[in-house]
Image: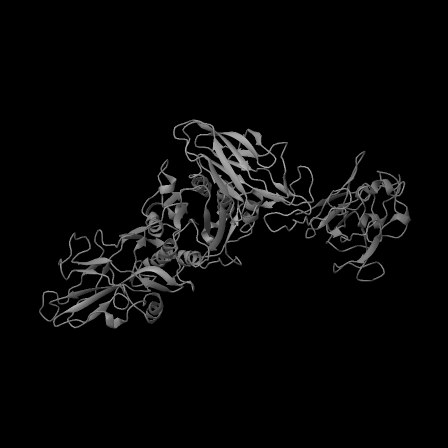
């Protein structure tokens, strides 16, 4: 194996990245005829460029990389201490000694991890694109040993920043991965989405967002909340203003739409930095049930200052990602890595494994037990996320409670918000042998306004449930289509039949819950605050902030009519003035009025919807008047023909000629012309001849800014 080279910059970075714990003096010094080899072991990331020690790691010295046993069962094995130092004291390294000048291999034997951790015996290296992947054994060769010397992984071997020539360049701190915490076994999750916005995503960006949308939609109707992070060579990604670590309720379609808008306009950057992305998640205040990393490539950067070469994957890029992933899992969050596309297929699974856990997903396997996935496209990844989201929602009924403003009437739920803490629901069953019922649950302050009942059906095909609500003083139930509740099967999207039960003080409904189904209901239907009455939130009335004029319908913006000028630009600016017309200055440079001024009058009119009945008699609507860029169609009037402003226009004029008379010179000269946009030719003096489509327009109706042409002209563009 090629020996690592160390530069001053690598050592300077290591002073922060690896030197955490005991001072160098804690490493035992060599005795007579001895050489000391010491390896620093790391666990969880503790700062942007610092890693905490990991005690209990067992390493061995091997004569060759593939040997089954260490060179010596005594001095050839070490166990890291509380400072993360694992030291070998190699005897007989003096002149003529058996081990003098010997180069040995440091490797982790089977079972060499402390409880709660697992080893990564090989990592994927190679181009960041995923091509030419190599499963590189995680082993390191020592220098030639000489008595009286101490060889450190953080200075003398293992560490390197020779990214061009050494794919196995390491940071000098031995990595091991934490075991992945289990996914909570209940319906409704707090999840952080971590989206890869590196340049390699390319045209697949809409599909990446669609996969995130699909996951969000799957959690809609459950008491779930979502956060979202982005990364390329940094986190947030270069083109993204901020991450969103706060949890957003997605129990309702409105909440889901609001969450999806957070990342809808995100754009791509460059580089892939798993380390910084996961460290952003680890230091966020919320504790997530799961963290889902959606990536299409291997890491090519690490640390918050984007170290690495940005084009190839080395040990060091993956090691630092593992340390940050350990910090995420240390908070109790399950880390699920989804590799999408060819960039993370095959051997790249080694790096996804090191990030999350040792269990790969196999088609048809247990989604909740899988630590990492390798999928062919984002559509498949989205479906897997959808199925994962609902994996613990079998035999469940989610009740989403909302409150509507006091000013609404009937079944109008405009302005509804999720209920706060304090709303109690009870569930019972008439089916014998169903466990987990009766039961009462109360909404919390998590913002979802939801509770979940999960009866134990066993092998029964279905169970009848009766769910009721403890109504609060000062509120009345708002029905939907005359029903107390509206239920939907989340697996199929189909409605579930319900029947109303209960009383005014404790309204309820009954339904049949199929086995393994996940049912979501909005209800009991939103409660409306009676004006002037108190409630669980201290008696404050919910104000409807929408402006409603007399009659109850929201105010509408006056319809705006715009005319198109010859260059295809909009003529007129919006101004809510009813019937009044204003002449506004033309802001386009280069257009001159015939008087020589650099601006011309522009007419802007805002009319109400019934303006057609009020136009001047005998004058056609503006959109039907003759215009130089309109094409005449006999019997059909004129239609708009928009001409891009950057393209020249060729106008062919159809000019009638009296028998026996030559066409006037001015007409022959104007017969075919090319005019750049925005330039006007002077109109010939004298009356305009009549065209085949009808008599000439009266002179009083001519526009000063339009060239006078026969009505029967045809315009075409030339590319």
Instruction: Give the image location of residue 349, x and y in percent.
Output: 34, 47
Instruction: Give the image location of residue 300, x and y in percent.
Output: 39, 57
Residue 104 versus residue 574 in the image, above or below: below
Q: Is residue 315 left or right of residue 531?
A: left
Instruction: Give the image location of residue 462, x and y in percent.
Output: 45, 28
In the image shown, does 531 or 308 lie closer to the viewer?
531
The quadrant of the picture occupied by the N terminus is bottom left
Q: Is residue 218 left or right of residue 616?
A: left
Q: Is residue 515 left or right of residue 719?
A: left
Q: How many marks?
A: 0
In the image shown, does 363 or 650 lie closer to the viewer?
363
Can you tell which quarter of the image residue 328 is in? bottom left
> How is the model colour-coded?
one colour
Q: Is residue 402 left or right of residue 47?
A: right
Residue 250 versus residue 316 in the image, above or below: above
Instruction: Give the image location of residue 403, x and y in percent.
Output: 61, 44
Residue 189 appears in the rendering: yes
What residue do we see at 42% from left, 39% from top? 392
């Amino acid at each position: 194996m090629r020996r690592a080279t160390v530069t001053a910059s690598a050592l300077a970075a290591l002073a922060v990245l690896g030197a955490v714990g005991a001072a160098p003096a804690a490493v035992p010094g060599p005795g007579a005829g001895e050489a000391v080899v010491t390896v620093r072991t790391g666990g969880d990331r503790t700062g942007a460029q610092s890693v905490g020690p990991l005690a209990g790691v067992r390493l061995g010295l091997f004569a060759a990389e593939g040997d089954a046993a260490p060179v010596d069962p005594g001095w050839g094995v070490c166990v890291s201490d509380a400072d993360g130092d694992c030291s070998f004291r190699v005897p007989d390294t003096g002149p003529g000694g058996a081990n003098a000048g010997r180069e040995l291999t440091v490797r982790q034997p089977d079972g060499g991890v402390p409880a709660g951790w697992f080893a990564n015996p090989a990592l994927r290296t190679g181009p960041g694109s995923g091509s030419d992947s190599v499963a590189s054994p995680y082993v390191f060769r020592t220098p030639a040993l000489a008595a009286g010397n101490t060889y450190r992984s953080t200075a003398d071997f293992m560490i390197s920043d020779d990214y061009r020539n050494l794919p196995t360049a390491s940071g000098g701190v031995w990595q091991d991965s934490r075991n992945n915490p289990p996914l909570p076994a209940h319906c409704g999750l707090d999840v952080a989405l971590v989206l890869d916005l590196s340049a390699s995503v390319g045209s697949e960006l809409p599909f990446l967002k669609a996969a995130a949308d699909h996951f969000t939609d799957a959690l809609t109707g459950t008491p779930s909340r979502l956060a979202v992070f982005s990364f390329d060579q940094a986190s947030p990604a270069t083109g993204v203003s901020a991450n969103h670590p706060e949890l957003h309720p997605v129990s309702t379609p409105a909440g889901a739409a609001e969450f999806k808008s957070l990342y809808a306009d995100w754009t791509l950057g460059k580089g892939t930095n798993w380390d910084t992305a996961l460290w952003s998640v680890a230091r966020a205040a919320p504790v997530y049930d799961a963290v889902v990393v959606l990536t299409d490539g291997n890491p090519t950067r690490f640390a918050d200052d984007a170290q690495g070469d940005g084009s190839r994957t080395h040990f060091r890029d993956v090691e630092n990602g593992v340390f940050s992933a350990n910090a995420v899992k240390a908070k109790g969050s399950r880390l699920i890595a989804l590799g999408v596309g060819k960039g993370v297929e095959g051997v790249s699974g080694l790096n996804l494994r090191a990030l999350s856990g040792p269990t790969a997903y196999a088609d048809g396997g247990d989604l909740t037990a899988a630590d990492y996935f390798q999928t062919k496209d984002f559509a498949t990844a989205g479906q897997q996320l959808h199925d994962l989201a609902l994996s613990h929602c079998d035999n469940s009924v989610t009740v989403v409670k909302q409150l509507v403003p006091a000013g609404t009437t009937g079944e109008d739920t405009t302005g509804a918000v999720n209920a706060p803490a304090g709303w109690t629901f009870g569930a019972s069953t008439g089916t014998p042998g169903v466990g987990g019922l009766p039961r009462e649950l109360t909404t919390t302050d998590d913002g979802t306004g939801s509770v979940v009942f999960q009866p134990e059906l066993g092998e029964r095909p279905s169970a009848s449930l009766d769910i009721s609500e403890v109504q609060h003083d000062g509120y009345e139930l708002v029905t939907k289509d005359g029903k107390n509740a509206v239920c939907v099967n989340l697996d199929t999207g189909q409605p579930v039949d319900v029947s109303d039960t209960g009383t005014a003080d404790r309204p309820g409904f009954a339904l049949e819950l199929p086995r393994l189904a996940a049912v979501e209901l909005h209800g009991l239907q939103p409660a409306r605050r009676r004006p002037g009455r108190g409630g669980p939130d201290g008696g404050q009335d919910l104000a409807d902030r929408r402006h409603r004029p007399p009659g109850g319908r929201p105010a509408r913006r006056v319809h705006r009519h715009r005319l198109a000028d010859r260059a295809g630009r909009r003529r007129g600016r919006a101004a809510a003035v009813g019937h009044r017309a204003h002449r506004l200055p033309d802001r386009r440079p280069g257009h001159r009025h015939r008087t020589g001024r650099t601006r011309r009058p522009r007419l802007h009119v805002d009319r109400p919807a019934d303006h057609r009945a009020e136009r001047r008699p005998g004058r056609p609507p503006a959109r039907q008047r003759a215009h130089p860029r309109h094409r005449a169609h006999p019997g059909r009037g004129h239609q708009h023909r928009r001409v891009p402003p950057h393209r020249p226009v060729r106008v062919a004029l159809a000019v009638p000629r009296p028998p026996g008379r030559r066409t006037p010179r001015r007409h022959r000269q104007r017969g075919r012309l090319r005019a750049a946009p925005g330039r006007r030719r002077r109109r010939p003096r004298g009356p305009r001849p009549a065209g085949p489509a009808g008599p000439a327009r009266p002179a009083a109706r001519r526009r000063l800014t339009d060239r006078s042409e026969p009505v029967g002209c045809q315009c075409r563009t030339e590319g």
